Image (spheres, rainbow, N blue to C red):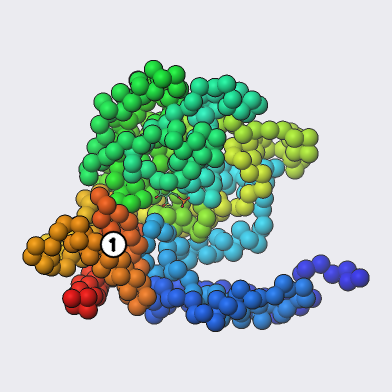
Amino acid sequence: MNEDGLDPRDWAELRALAHRALDETFDAVAGIRERPPWRPIPPAIRAAIAADPLPRAPADPSEVYGTFLERIAPYAVDNRHPRFFGWVHGAGTPAGIIAALLAAGMNANVGGRDHAAVEVERRVIRWWCEIFGFPETASGILTTGTSMANLIAILVARRKAAERVRSDGLAGEPALMGYTSMDAHASLAGAFDVAGLGKAALRMWPTHPNSELNSHALRTLIAHDRAAGKQPFIIIATAGSASTGSIDNLNELADLAREEGLWFHVDGAFGALVQLAPSLRDRIAGIERADSIAFDLHKWLHVPYDCGAVLIRDGALHEATFADHAPYLQRNTRGTAAGEPWFTDFGPELSRGFRALGVWFTMKTYGLDRFGELIARQCAMAQSLGERIAATPSLELLAPVTLNIVCFRYVPPRPSGEPDEVSERVTDELNARLLIELQERGLAVPSSTRVDGKLALRMNVMNHRTTQADLDEVLAAVLSVGKELELSSA
Ligand SMILES: Cc1ncc(COP(=O)(O)O)c(C=O)c1O
């Protein structure tokens, strides 16, 4: 039996490979403009990945790395690219690459115990509490993303509304009801599902294009539910919707939640980060009044995937929602198992990686003021893109540009007498093709959404590498490819 572990006999050789891998990783980022923002995976490569046999025998690390370079690296989405505008993706940073390497090197398990990685996560959480004006008694935890952060917040609110839920479940409890807008992210209804409340228990109020809430209608809905024997327990506001970037009126919702005695949660996946930009901060005024805030650090802070966070105003309730002291997780006042409370007491997971290092490295390397400047610049670029679209006859701006998201479409001339539904269908089809052409030709990667039922090209201007020239190029590409498709289908 070979008594060696998994470390190499020849560190020098592995070290050289690691240096090469790091150099080539930086080269890939530095040369990002030389490649398209996305390219399809060639069928042969896809087939090779799918046919990769179970690796029972070892391979030389340089061979494994060679396969990575051939089959994986070239076929990224690639959200690092300055002309990637899809969904809400962060771009990553060079500092984040270093942090990811160091975190992998430490291989820390931040579920608990007494070590510096835990202290770093605690510090990072306190920084974000300070940013949002949360008190010392607040708590928080880093998560995989805002979907998990929303779930944790909803579980804490559920625990407040149904104190025995952890032992007895929800049987015998009145139906717990939540309220949010139609623009809310699907992860919220998903969290209601996972929490055993049912998706239908999350009522969604309609918003008009400026997303101003009709709080009178919401109050009526809450009263109606109470009269029907249900138990309203949470109002969820969105600060920056995934579809259009719309923002609910947080102060109005905070008032309503207070009057009604309900939990007030803010899903600020990316919008919460405008707190870092003094010129934009007033758009999310009221966020500091939330009982809980969910937001991502892998979006507008560009921390390496995956990393989100949830903050809970009532830290004791947060801990009471998750803490469970199994005998094999005995805490001590001294030794390795000291350092209570542990992060596992604030979420559903026990083992957790050292995500906090990416956040800590990013915040310290660039400084928050720089992120504030970038966020303000990106919102200004999105605003001016929206204005140019609105002023271009063959384009239509489909939603107000609230933050950094621009939703629009190419509008072919309408033959006289063509009925509305035909014209809408033709326009939708053209835009669906236009989107794919832009992506497949490697020109740009917008994504799509629907605004008032219309298919929209959706540009999320978030990448710190994006310049005005990139936006000019994309607009020119939309017009020329749109025209080409219009003529080919005429
Ligand atoms: C408003 C909003 N909430 C929640 C999410 C989900 O976040 P994540 O993908 O980090 O889970 C997103 C993602 O874009 C979002 O925009």
Name of the residue lying farthest toward the left? 416
Residue drawn at x 46%, y 38% as measured from the top left: 199
Q: Quadrant of residue 487?
A: bottom left
The CB of the residue at mark 1 lies under 8 Å from ligand 1? no
Residue 247 place in picture, x, y as percent: 30, 42
Give the residue type at disc 1.
Answer: Leu
Residue drawn at x 31%, y 49% as measured from the top left: 245
Quadrant in the picture for the N terminus: bottom right
Q: Is residue 206 left or right of residue 26?
A: left
Look at the picture and state if 283 lies above or below 41.
above
Residue drawn at x 66%, y 81% as measured from the top left: 63
Look at the picture and state if 209 lies above or below 17.
above
Q: Callout 1: 10 Å neighbours few (<14), some, many (20+)?
A: many
The answer to whether residue 194 is visible is: yes
Residue 116 place in picture, x, y as percent: 64, 48
Residue 335 place in picture, x, y as percent: 76, 40
Which of 41 and 363 lies nearest the eye of the viewer? 41
Which of 372 and 171 lies nearest the eye of the viewer? 171
What residue does disc 1 label?
Answer: 457
Q: Quadrant of residue 159?
A: top right
